[in-house]
Amino acid sequence: MKAKAARKSPAKKSNPGKPLHFALDSKLLDAPLTTALDLLGKVQVKLPKDILISILGGDPAAELPGAEPEPVYGAKARANVQGNIIPGFNKDHQTFLFFRVGNVRRAKAWLRWIAPFITSTEEVLAFVRIYRALRARLGVRNPPLCSTWVNIGFSHRAIALLAGAADAAAFGDQSFRQGLATRSTYLGDPTDAALPGHRRHWLVGGPKNEADILVIVAADDEQHLVATADAIKTRAAAAGMKLLFEQRGDNLPGALRGHEHFGFKDGISQPGVRGKVSTAPGDYITPRYIDHTDARAKMFAKPGQLLLWPGQFLLGERRQHPEDLVASAPPATNFPRWAALGSYLVCRRLRQDVPAFWKFAIAAGAALGLPPVQVASILVGRWPSGAPISRSPASDNAALAGDEWANNHFIFDDETRPSQLRPIPGYGGDGFTQARADVLATVCPHFAHIRKSNPRDVATDLGKPHDSMLRMILRRGIPFGPPIAGVRHPPRDLKRRERGLMFVSYGATIEDQFEFLTRRWANSPLQPNTGGHDPVIGQADRSGNRQRFVDFPTTTGTQRIVIDCEWVTPTGGGYFFSPPIEAIAGVLGA
Amino acid sequence: MALVTRFDTPASLRDLPPGSAFYDDWHTHIANRLGASTPGSGGGEFYDASETDVNIVGARDLVWMAFPRRVLMPNRDDRGAAFTAAENRNVQDEYCEWFTTRNAAGKIVRVTFVTEAPEYWEALWAVDRARVVALYRALVSPAVVETDLHVGGVYQRANLWNNANGIVHLRQAINTLNAALGLAQGSANSAPARDNYEMSAVASTAVDPRVTYDVGTLVRKGLSVTLRDPIGLYIAGWDDTGWTRPSGAPVGNYWTIVRGVPGQVLRLDYEVPAAVGFVVGDIRIGGRPIQWGGQLAEHVTVTIGGVAGGRAR
């Protein structure tokens, strides 16, 4: 049965038992789409004011008596880890350069040239601290401080070329050795070569255009970005390297800064990496805000931010214990010794069809009797501002969205209890309504993107939440293309322009982290919990059938809604390894 | 919801004629293992649906991976080692076991998954041995004879045809329906916790915490929880996305439900029809050739159905 989409009034109510389908090409959806896109430009986030965060030297009060000591990353180690892994570039403008190695000897020379430009954890942490100090001293949100950073990753083929086949074979992650193109359909990408997401059509990373080297340039200033990228390209060309593809990424402007193209704030929930910058008491890489009198200080850096041992992201470091929420386990050893402190980098160029996503939300809203923005927010699990629906089920909440100690503080199965925070000068505390127990997933459904990719306290197909911690990744993506969200009457040519997300993640395995999250959870209607596919990033391709569904909660049960179209399409990428900086010239360029 | 007047067999199997006393025996078997009410720390309970009527507010299929997590975790840096180890049914402890059949060249030609409880077969044996032998012959080999299946009249769970020569039902020591019922009931009165992060340590399998946490959290809410009739361990799903033929094209649907019905699958075969021209061992999963049955088990899920509701106290 095809339900008529977007009936005007009254909205069509759901028909329990019969799955709903929507025809998204209906002209009836055009007017409400215009309204929805316009509203996204009015998304408000109220940031707390006059908060002073201690930023230098750590706070002795953050130490936890009796806790397992965390590794100290001294200056040498900090200078060896690439800065986009930890703590992340988080720059407004980035360029992704995908190269193919021509002549190995000349490529090595180029690596020796670029190695001093590679930005380390040390430099990014120093910048962040100075930036925060300036912010506090000047009393402005965006102090005039700029930098331009460069990081680099290598494919398995590149490592074989540059370091030798034996070293390449020593990388234990089989998915890395195979490459993204080989793993594409395993990730749910189309098997039908006629479909645009098929790897054969990828702009980079397909079977015939796999990149050897990915360079990420990030800058606050666009001119600096262009100049640095140009210099790298010029030297690369002189070294016989072929630029296969170049992608510019930019954070969205204005009120949508930090949002992805569908209009939702992105990157709120990231794991906190354990470890210290120095031996000074409390000098942690990830600032700790929970008071030691609250038992959750052992496992959370701030409310909702789980602490993970660094070996989940850096090869050769102690990693998360599979059976313990706070203890570490011995490091992995399945990699060449020189690769220690490196990380696997997954890059996916994902095209987003913003009108299709919102037309679906409009059509579903009409059928369910809900505003489109509420339907879309339930699909995501957060309102456009980033406020979690678990804490604000009925409407968006700008102040909640802007409160970094509150906007990620919620669990699903039980009542969320307030956290006892250490004193934060100027912060009045999390006074928002806490999330109620949602064990039946009637508020934030099991299919919701944030519940799929981060089930938090909920048991999964792999058992206890301890296992879920093994799956977490560091996300470092940035949008590309001109925004359409927030544009009241987008001209036709703007609608047609391509836009999407340069998805970037880091982890100590590709198979057990990125691929696990994608295939086992986002793409499965049963895992980690039954209720449908992840409607945002999930894909299905069972014998060519790409239909997905969600079991949408209603007041009388659930209504199955079939998703017949796709709004996220893979268009390129690759699996890379971000080596320790010393190895770029010392091993790969030697 | 009305009282369950007779617990049905798993997937409502009818291996004997409908009027057989076997079905009453099975009901008794289940009912005897359920306490009328197992109270929980939060005011909820696990209850016997044949004795207590509850207004159901939600149903939930608890789903977990068929591949044993206890084998996977110690080998998380060497999947090949995990797959090799897991071919031994003694370690297949997620209430799902599989049997890998290879051809003369050593290539896999069929992988059979089962979630059937040994207690069911013992109950069937007690009523009609000939029927058990007939089922074995149909499922495993025409060569099965009655004496292969018992010692002194006592049915042997790990008999020749449910061990070295084939698979009929679960036979790993803790893969029993009684254990599953005990796990579900026992989860009601696990140690008090305010949320799952406070739950005390549980087994390193996938299934134990899956059930313990899910039942525990419902009971904490004061809900009455039980297993959905027909009570059974079922194969929930199988995902062959990204599996390819030798040509690189996607595989066809080579799955066959042998016992049970969709949604309540008890026995599942994966075998390429002879006419297709290749065997399971020629298939690749995400570009990797199938060398072990466990590679399939990673993409098979198991489930037990639960319901929760409230009753006047």
Image: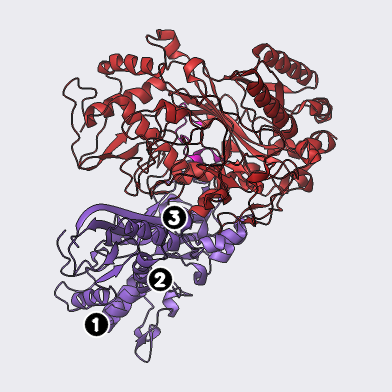
Chain colours: A red, B purple
Q: Position of residue B135 (x, y in %)?
A: 31, 73
Q: Is residue B247 visible?
A: no
**Where does the image place residue A252, in percent across and percent down from the top left?**
52, 18
Q: Is residue B159 visible?
A: yes
Which residue, given by chain and number where applicable, does mark 2 sit on? B170
Pick the front one: A293 or A70: A293
Looking at the image, residue B192 sits to the left or right of residue A162; the answer is left
Q: Secondary structure at mark 2?
A: loop
Q: Which mark is first along the chain, 2 or 3?
A: 2
* Horizontal arrangement in the rendering, residue A459 relative to residue A12 (left or right): right
* Magenta-drawn stretch, dominant element (helix, strand or loop): loop
Residue type, numbered disc 2: Leu
- Kindly identify which residue carries mark 1: B127
Displayed quadrant of residue B224: bottom left
Q: Residues within 10 Å of mark 1 (few under 14, many from 20)?
A: some
Give yes or no for contact between labels 1 and 3 (Cβ–Cβ under 8 Å): no
Write down the chain letter for disc 2: B
The residue range painted magenta reads A183-198
Q: Secondary structure at mark 3?
A: helix
Where's the N terminus of chain B, which quadrant? Answer: bottom left
Q: From mark 1 to mark 2, how far is it between C-alphas?
A: 20 Å
Look at the picture and state if B307 lies above or below B128: above
At 61% from the left and 29% from the top, the residue drawn is A208
Assign the C terminus of chain B to one quadrant of the image. bottom left
A167, B188: nearer the viewer: B188
In the image, farthest residue toward the bottom: B152
Q: Nearer the viewer, residue A119 or A7?
A: A119
Residue A196 colored magenta?
yes
In which quarter of the view is residue A210 placed?
Answer: top right
Alpha-carbon span between mark 1 and mark 3: 44 Å
